Image (cartoon, rainbow, N blue to C red):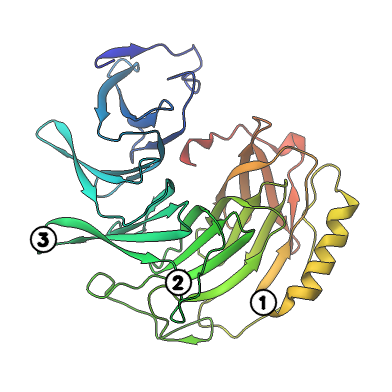
């Protein structure tokens, strides 16, 4: 497919690159698009001067389907992970993309990968009930990893597959979602990589690498996960058509525990409301922040979530229609039909 032009419709916002696409990522100025057509290949489209997209690169290094990828905008590097339990960092040199194998130390398929805000490390989620935080080791000229799997007492941190990861803009706090119906906030400070390490984080003094500083329950396994631009809020979607939003505020701020509100869209199932209140009362000791809302929605599950601003979220899922939620008067509400615009979910 090298050099093959991709036919787009008259609407410049619509571009069909493959019958199936497992994951994709844009470069900084949106002039290049990397994607995987549900196989082991990494394709990179380049936008020509005439506005047409050309399938410029077809890269084959993985042995199985690529499950996730992310593009570091400032350093212009792409990281991919796959069902083959490997990850590669791709760097553009001499007019070609050159791969470097990452030492993950995982024995199950990789599920999700994301660069940190400073682009000096990235996190890879796995079916091995762990997360690998990877960074470049200058002296050996390779990418190595530290695995988050057990606490100091050798107790497993994750009860099942880790499905998604998201970085706080501070470059140290990592949010993880998993199929054990939990979201965890974890310290990932790496000596020699992170110059500024927090003295405390949510009441935990000098949290070590891999320390879970917060944990939240979910009604279904976690699909999408994201921090707000300021990092003051983390939100996620569940497989049971639920959405959560947690205000974490300033990491040095005193613990704050507020009332729970329900995020509504369409018909809210009564059972979800009873589940909500029961869960909050039973597990409130575990939620040390302001847990705003959860609700099962009347739509199909939402797979991805993105903050457009501190007060606006866009989600996409199996209904194939973007859904927008706005924050008003302390709670999250579905945007009215006339207030919705067409949001491109490519950034997800």
Q: Which residue in the structure is indicated by mark 1?
A: 286
Rendered image quadrant of residue 8: top left
Helix or strand or loop: what does disc 1 sit on? helix
- Considering the image in quadrants, where does the N terminus appear? top left
What residue appears at the point 83 percent right and 61 percent down from the top-left corner? Answer: 275
- In this view, the mark in front (1 or 2): 2
Picture coordinates of residue 236, whole percent (x, y):
61, 54
Label 3 neighbour load within 10 Å: few <14, some 14-19, many 20+: few
**Which comes sooner in the sequence, label 2 or label 3?**
3
Q: Is residue 327 left or right of residue 177?
A: right
Query: Which residue matches tag 2?
Result: 150
Report x, y in % for residue 15.
46, 20
Q: Are marks 1 and 2 in contact (CB under 8 Å)?
A: no
Residue found 72% across the figure and 46% down from its top: 241
Q: Position of residue 256 (x, y in %)?
A: 66, 81
For residue 254, side relative to residue 19 (left or right): right
| Element class at badge 3 | loop
Residue in the picture at 34% in, 79% down: 197
Numbered mark located on residue 140 in the image: 3
Q: Secondary structure at mark 2?
A: loop
Compared to 173, does 177 lie above or below? above
Tell me the residue at 12%/57% (across/down). 141
């Amino acid at each position: 497919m090298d050099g093959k032009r991709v036919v787009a419709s008259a609407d410049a916002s619509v571009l069909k690159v493959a019958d199936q696409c497992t994951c994709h990522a844009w470069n900084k100025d949106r002039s290049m698009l990397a994607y995987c057509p549900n196989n082991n290949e990494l394709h990179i489209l380049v936008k020509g001067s005439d506005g047409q997209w050309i399938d410029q690169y077809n890269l084959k290094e993985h042995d199985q389907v690529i499950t996730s990828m992310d593009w570091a905008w400032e350093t212009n590097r792409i990281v991919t992970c796959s069902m083959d339990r490997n990850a590669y960092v791709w760097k553009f040199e001499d007019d070609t993309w050159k791969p470097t194998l990452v030492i993950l130390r995982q024995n199950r398929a990789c599920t999700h990968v994301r660069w940190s805000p400073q682009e000096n490390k990235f996190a890879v989620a796995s079916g091995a009930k762990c997360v690998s935080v990877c960074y470049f080791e200058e002296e050996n000229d390779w990418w190595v990893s530290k695995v988050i799997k057990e606490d100091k007492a050798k107790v497993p941190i994750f009860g099942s597959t880790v499905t998604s990861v998201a970085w706080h803009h501070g470059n140290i706090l990592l949010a993880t979602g998993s199929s054990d119906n939990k979201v965890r906030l974890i310290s990932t400070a790496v000596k020699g990589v992170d110059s500024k390490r927090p003295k405390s984080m949510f009441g935990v003094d000098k949290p070590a690498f891999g320390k879970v500083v917060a944990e939240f329950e979910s009604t279904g396994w976690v699909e999408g996960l994201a921090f707000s631009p300021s990092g003051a809020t983390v939100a996620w979607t569940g497989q049971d058509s639920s959405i959560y939003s947690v205000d974490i505020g300033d990491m040095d701020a005193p613990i704050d525990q507020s009332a729970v509100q329900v995020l509504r869209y369409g018909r809210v199932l009564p059972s979800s409301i009873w589940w909500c209140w029961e869960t909050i009362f039973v597990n409130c000791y575990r939620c040390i922040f302001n847990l705003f809302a959860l609700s099962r929605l009347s739509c199909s599950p939402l797979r991805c979530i993105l903050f457009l601003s501190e007060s606006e979220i866009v989600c996409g899922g199996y209904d194939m229609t973007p859904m927008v939620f706005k924050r008003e008067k302390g709670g999250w509400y579905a945007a009215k039909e006339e207030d919705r615009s067409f949001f491109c979910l490519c950034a997800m």
